[in-house]
Amino acid sequence: MHIPDGFISPQTYLPLYAVAGVAWVYGARSLRRQLDADALPTLAVMTALSFVLMMLALPLPGGATAHAAGIGLLAVSFGGWMGFMAISLVLMMQALLFGVGGVTALPINALALGLIGSFAAAGCWRLLRRYNESVALFLAGWFSIVLPAILIALVLGIQPNIAHDANGAPLFFPFDLSITLPAVVLPHLLVGVAEGVLTVLGYRYFTRLRAKLAR
Amino acid sequence: MNLDRAYLGFYLGAVFAATLIHDPVWLACGLGLALLASGRKAMGILRQALFAVLTFNLLISLSYILMAWLQDVSPWVTLIRLNLRVLLITCLTFLFIARVNLFRALDFSPGLTFVLGLAYSQALTFRRAQDDFRLALASRSLKPPRLIDRYRASAAAAAWFIEKALHAATQSSQALRSRGFFND
């Protein structure tokens, strides 16, 4: 889902870098407090896990595939900040080591997928798990994809309004909200279902494994 | 300042500049300069960049041509500008990846270098394993696998990665503790 380089105006990515920078500093401090000496290796390995989950193709009927992100699974298993930092590191790795995504899109992608996605999932899980664990997990996964998709559609859709030439021609992403919202959000309502299922099954497996490791 | 960090600064500056320039001629000059700086790797970098942006940019460009035709406006300047900018930034990124050691560039923060190094090495291991899983499914299927088989394969792979990640995190943490990493 994440945005590639070159489609976002500096009027958008510079302020968002400032916001993301504050969140990264706060997230790093928060993780250090939460997890103590295990923070660094856990963060590194969860980053790698998230990286590979993004590569896993979830088959859809008709031969198409969707890619999960593992945001919901990370957030409900390790909390919002771990999810945010791991997703941010994945995006940084993809941008600077694999040439996917990009540095101008990094703050938007990190804030949408990492911050909004992780905290939506963690919040959903915390709020709903007392009623029904499976529903809470499914919705955590679903929201962790759908809310970032809405934010990304909004950021893309405002580009023609905030960056255009004297004739009104767009300088960056050329489509407005009337196109980006349905084009980005509607497919992700379905991808969110796959992410929800991954979160339910992944979390159950994860909890069993953790209990086995603790014995 | 080490050379890699200087290159990182230069790369970020060049990407920023590419988003400030809107004249297609200057963007084309920038692309030419980036390819000139790539030296013998220029064609490889251009091919890699074209391959990386092709699907997304083709989709955007064709959709924009359709929209412009419906609105009776000329799409060409916008499309040339957009595609040149994306290609320029992608070429700069691949040139950066080819020339710069990111870990040395980020060594001002030992924590970040450590996390990135460990995550990168794990990601490479996981990526190789993911390729193996994909090839294993293909080699064991005489006919294209059914949807249920693909679900099972994806679920098995995800379970393997989760288990491996948990073990790797515990192992790394124990290895670091035993070597006194956190006591320094």
Image: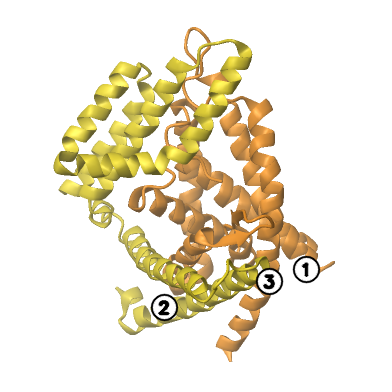
Q: Earlier in the sequence, mark 3 or mark 1?
A: 1
Indicate the secondary structure of the residue bearing disc 3: helix
Q: Chain of mark 1?
A: A
- Give the residue number, with chain letter if any, for mark 1: A134
Drawing shade for chain A: orange
Q: Amino acid at mark 2?
A: Ser
Instruction: Residue lying at the far bottom in this picture: please name it.
Output: A215
- Give the residue number, with chain letter if any, for mark 3: A201
Q: Amino acid at mark 1?
A: Ser
Query: Could you say where residue B30 lies in the image, as x and y percent from the top left?
Result: 26, 26
Chain letter, colour yellow in render: B
Instruction: Residue lying at the far front in this picture: please name it.
Output: B142
Front residue (pair A180, A73): A180
The residue positioned 45% from the left and 56% from the top of the image is A90
- Give the residue number, with chain letter if any, for mark 2: B173
The residue positioned 60% from the left and 54% from the top of the image is A66
| In the image: residue B142, left or right of residue B22 | right
Query: Could you say where residue B161 lies in the image, as x and y percent from the top left?
Result: 51, 73
Are there few (<14), some (14-19), or many (20+) residues within 10 Å of tag 3?
A: some
Q: Is residue B48 visible?
A: yes
Indicate the secondary structure of the residue bearing disc 2: helix
